[in-house]
């Protein structure tokens, strides 16, 4: 197992209006967040597309936004545009840490945690990516709120992210988890099929840390198949492999 440096995005939000400001621009109820509590939230555009996803942590005199480092700069820029006459100060507190790779990737997929730029991006809305817990439908207005409320009341979205398990595959060579000769390769974009029909696609995959002969994956599946117990097939470039939906993300 190797390790590599990965930066953690961290934005400090301080000032007399910090709480009201975050409550106004984020998808969650920040006004009710008490010191020591944290909550998942989204920053959306007016079309309910995801600008950023973050964990909001409440401290005595400020809030901390924990997020993917790739989202840090655009989040800072978007938040700054929302500041009008608010008493709000944004400070970049990002730092570095060592994370094991690729075991961390397998653990992420097994936990059903979507990754920016891999499992979701600016073209997605929270309800597609299983970020329902990051949205408050009762707090009132925020960017994208009307569209999300309309979708929620009219049956939701046309695709959703699910977790999949792939069956009966050989262990990776040399006891590792990398892409080696003879290893089954499941990659982003591989088709998810059932009864000869394409119903979705893979977004990320890795050998399981819990079951050495199994690949775990995340992928989008079309409406009507999210809770399907039917046998699925992952169509790769040169072969196919059986799979099943193993849980909601």
Image (cartoon, rainbow, N blue to C red):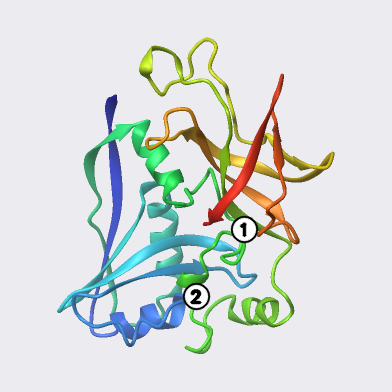
Residue lying at the far top in this picture: please name it: 181
Q: Which residue is mark 1?
A: 124
Check the image and report above or below for 46 versus 202: below
Check the image and report above or below for 84 versus 79: below
Residue lying at the far left in this picture: please name it: 60
Q: Which residue is mark 2?
A: 135
* Upstream in sequence: badge 2 or badge 1: 1
Give residue 3's quadrant in the image: top left
Q: In this rendered view, identify the residue nearer to me: 166 or 102.
A: 166
Secondary structure of the residue carrying tag 1 is loop
What crowding class fits label 1: few (fewer than 14 Cα within 10 Å), some (14-19), or many (20 or more)?
A: some
Check the image and report above or below for 228 versus 218: below
Check the image and report above or below for 217 versus 39: above
Q: Residue at x 61, y 35 (%)?
A: 188
Give residue 39's quadrant in the image: bottom left
Q: Residue at x 76, y 41 (%)?
A: 193
């Amino acid at each position: 197992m190797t390790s590599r440096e990965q930066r953690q995005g961290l934005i400090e939000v301080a000032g007399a209006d910090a709480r009201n400001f975050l409550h106004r621009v984020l998808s969650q109820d920040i006004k009710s967040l008490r010191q020591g509590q944290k909550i998942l939230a989204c920053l959306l555009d007016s079309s309910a597309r995801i600008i950023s996803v973050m964990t909001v942590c409440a401290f005595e005199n400020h809030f901390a936004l924990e997020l993917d480092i790739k989202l840090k700069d655009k989040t800072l820029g978007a938040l700054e545009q929302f500041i009008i006459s608010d008493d709000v100060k944004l400070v970049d507190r990002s730092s570095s840490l060592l994370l094991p790779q690729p075991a961390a990737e397998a653990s992420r997929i097994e936990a059903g945690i979507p990754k920016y730029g891999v499992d979701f991006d600016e073209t997605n809305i929270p309800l597609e990516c299983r970020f329902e817990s990051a949205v408050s439908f009762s707090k009132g207005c925020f960017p994208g709120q009307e569209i999300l409320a309309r979708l929620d009341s009219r049956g939701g979205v046309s695709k959703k992210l699910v977790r999949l398990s792939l069956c009966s595959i050989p262990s990776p060579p040399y006891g590792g988890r990398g892409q080696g000769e003879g290893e089954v390769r499941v990659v982003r974009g591989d088709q998810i099929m059932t009864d000869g029909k394409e119903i979705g696609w893979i977004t990320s995959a890795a050998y399981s840390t819990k079951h050495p002969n199994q690949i775990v994956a995340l992928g989008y599946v079309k409406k009507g198949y999210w809770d399907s117990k039917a046998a699925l097939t992952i169509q790769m470039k040169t072969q196919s492999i059986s799979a099943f939906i193993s849980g909601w993300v």
